[in-house]
Amino acid sequence: MTATTHDHSDHSHEAHHQKGFVERWLMSTNHKDIGTLYITMAVIGACVGGVLSIIMRQQLMYPHNNIITSGAAWNAIITAHGLIMIFWFVMPALIGGFGNWFVPMMIGAPDMAFPRLNNMSFWFLAAGFVFVMIGLLLGNGAGAGWTLYPPLDNAQYSPGMATDFSLFSLHLAGISSLLGAINFIATILNMRAPGMTMHKMPLFCWAILVTAFLLLLAIPVLAGAITMLIMDRNFGTSFFEPSGGGDPVLFQHLFWFFGHPEVYIMILPAFGIISHVVSTFSRKPIFGYLGMAYAMVVIGFVGFIVWAHHMFVSAISTDSKVYFEVATLVIAVPTGIKIFSWIATMWGGSIEFKTPMLWAIGFIFLFVIGGATGVVLANAGLDQELHNDYFLIAHFHYVLSMGAAFAVFAGFYYWIGKMTGHPYPEFWGKVHFWTFFIGVNLTFFPMHFLGLAGMPRRYPDYADAFAGWNYVSSIGSIISGVSTLVFFYVLYAVFTSKESLADNYWGEGATTLEWAVPSPAPHHTFEDVPVIR
Amino acid sequence: MSSPAHSATDQIKGTVPHPYHLVNPSILPLCGGVAAMTTFAGIIVAAHLHSFVLLGIGLLFVVSTMFVWWRDVVSEARTPGLHKVITQVGLRYGMALFITSEVMFFVSFFWNYFNYFFFPEKMGTAFAPVWPPQGVTTIDPFAIPLFNTMVLLLSGTTITWAHHSLLEGDNKNTVRGLAVTVMLGLMFLCGQAWEYTHSPFPFYHGGIFASSFFIATGFHGVHVIVGTVFLTVCLFRAMKGQFTPQRHFGFEAAAWYWHFVDVVWLFLFVCIYFLGRSAIVAG
Ligand code: HEM
Ligand SMILES: [Cu+2]
């Protein structure tokens, strides 16, 4: 079949839809089904990580509270919360989930480059989740924090198998991400539809491309670092053991060489989603498309040379501090390009406040707050004071549980109709947004004050002076928890809905290729690939 | 240039049949995940409970999954019409990206080494700030290490010999070149095994020099094993006449990998064996 006009009625492969459960979900080689598996993983991760966070906030609601009586249990909970939210919620939702679903569709490809590898990425992640849960529950649990610093997790202070399970869970999640990254890069570089040049490619694909490169280059360094940790713990080496001449600060360098790119791994796909949503609901093409694309490339590049801003109190020389401070501040420039371009896109547009747009505007608003506190923390002198206190916690929750998580929800409301063929209930979507918005702001804004007043992070108790704002924060976390129940109602309503949706249910503003195919999209989207003008 | 202002369907001017290889559902990815999980759990159990059963099962599972997986890939590649040109290009991207990630894996071990090589004071005040640390006798770089360097460099030429023969359709010399390369790989491994068993410093509780040395050279050794297996597979495939001058990506991937392993070794030789040698070296 050669150049006919695009007609999708004959594309749905009936055979695909008749697969049994095992074949469809345990043996999948389809990017949409694998994407769905990832999203399921993300929902599970968010629930477990979320429950852990509510437990923590319950403990911190009043000073000298007795909900968690053992320090080791507390440490295990904070560690698992951090690891799970990053590796089993944000990453699988944004990269494995939406990336898998929509990158092939947006570039006009029928699937990913390596479908079996794609599926194995998912199973490695699932295996990692089993390990991180063992790390939480076995014995005293793994309690070194998500940053895993030695000596906290060496054989002396964290004996027992739990910490090894947590370290290996990162190996599993890391291999998963690495294989996924290879797959995304090969797909994007090699499988774009005829006529889809790099400079016509949707921004979400650009975002995933840059993210994949960050994963490709950062994950192996983390793998090396945790390999050395595991060896120190179990096989008598002394990489980070001063008694044998080892250097614990080296671990921090290796960890943050991965860790800072990792924060961009979580936020770049979010940037991509926000660009699509803002453009769709302003009914305007994104302002400064090329600038937006290359700003992400620059962020990705600079993201590799700022890592030691996490180590301002870790015995690095003054010269290094100056360098890392200035380099970090430079990132604000491409980030500013993104923010201002979103605003310019909305400017003069005919804006429609549908639920996805609310999440996107919420994202922009709150991400700017998180970015501003980041600029504060980037000052080495100030950071001496603020490091590892609640100001830092506020910073990274504004960029993560309000930045990245808001983008997850923006993407969910934007695309769920394309994925299922059913609309979400607009009213409940908005209820979800507003309750969540109030909940998280109430939770995290007071943490700025607590941090400035000197409350340190990672303790299950605090001085009486901090009681007021901690109480407010805990109330906020309950509101966010209730809000998540609203989200589950939305999910239920979508899957029980009898209504079906048109190809492009957002209308004029939605211009990328996924809106040219039916809702739900056919199994391989394009049995014949589109030729782009 | 901005993203298209017209509607989603307007930008499509027609369609063409897709040229890609969409694979059938497969249980192997799930096997791979379970195999990796078993192996890692096996390592933990071996370290803490001194039982190697789980580790053995895991490794067996990993190896058999890989075997069946690549057998499938090879047979798909040999089925006419499945791997069109664009799929072959995709495989090249895949291999090149994989090797890039491997380079970064070694970066972490070199970073560790250079941390002490350039800043020996980072070993802490209990140690004199010199590298290699005082009291460490290192391996003579001009004994086995130099020999192994020569072996690997030679193997780089023999793989090229095989490659050129392949391009000229001379299968006999392709097989010869591959066989010699595999033998050189094994020779290297024997040399390293001898070196490890006669090392002047112990691995266990051997301090930071031994740790840095063994992790970098050890992971390199693992990569030599993998590369040798990869080349052996190619050797058997060449003996069956499965490569043609036009299509032999399996061979090329093995050759790329082998050159990568070779280059890592040169860095190890210069930075660790040669520049990191002590005033008096051991045999
Ligand atoms: C303008 C951009 C940003 C700047 C200047 C910045 C700066 C910083 C600095 C200096 C720290 C270290 C503070 C300390 O440890 O005392 C930090 C911590 C952190 N940042 Fe950012 N940041 C920015 C954006 C982001 C983004 C986009 C994310 C994630 C999506 C993020 C996530 C984090 C996390 C998770 C930590 C805490 C790590 C830990 O110690 O556990 N940051 N940031
Ligand atoms: Cu950072």
Image (cartoon, grey):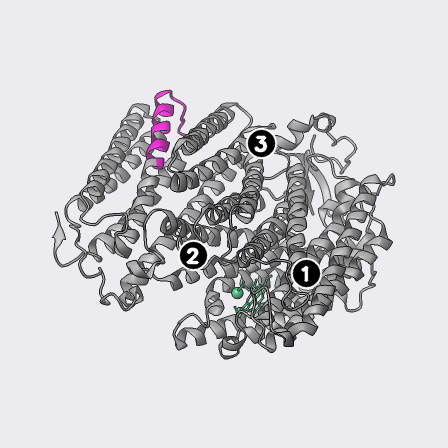
- Read off the magenta span: B226-245
Indicate if the residue with disc 2 has its beta carbon within 8 Å of ligand 1: no
User: Label 3 crowding class (10 Å Cα cut-off): few <14, some 14-19, many 20+?
Assistant: many
Q: CA distance from mark 3 to mark 1?
A: 52 Å
- Given the image, on which type of amino acid does mark 3 rest? His
Compare residues A113 and A488 and report the one nearer the observer: A488
Give percent across and percent down for residue B125.
28, 69
Asked whether the viewer can see residue A341, the reply is no
Q: Which mark is residue A157?
A: 2
Q: Check residue A62 for magenta coloring.
A: no
| Label 2 or label 1, whichever comes before in sequence order | 1
Q: Secondary structure at mark 2?
A: loop
Q: Which quarter of the picture shows residue A248?
A: bottom left
Question: Which residue is painted at 66% across and 30% down in the image?
Answer: A24
| Magenta stretch prevailing secondary structure | helix
Where residue B21 is drawn, which disc sits there? 3
Q: Nearer the viewer, mark 3 or mark 2?
A: 2
Assign a secondary structure to mark 1. helix
Report whether residue A294 is seen: yes
Q: Compared with residue A145, is residue A457 higher up or lower down, i.e. above or below? A: below
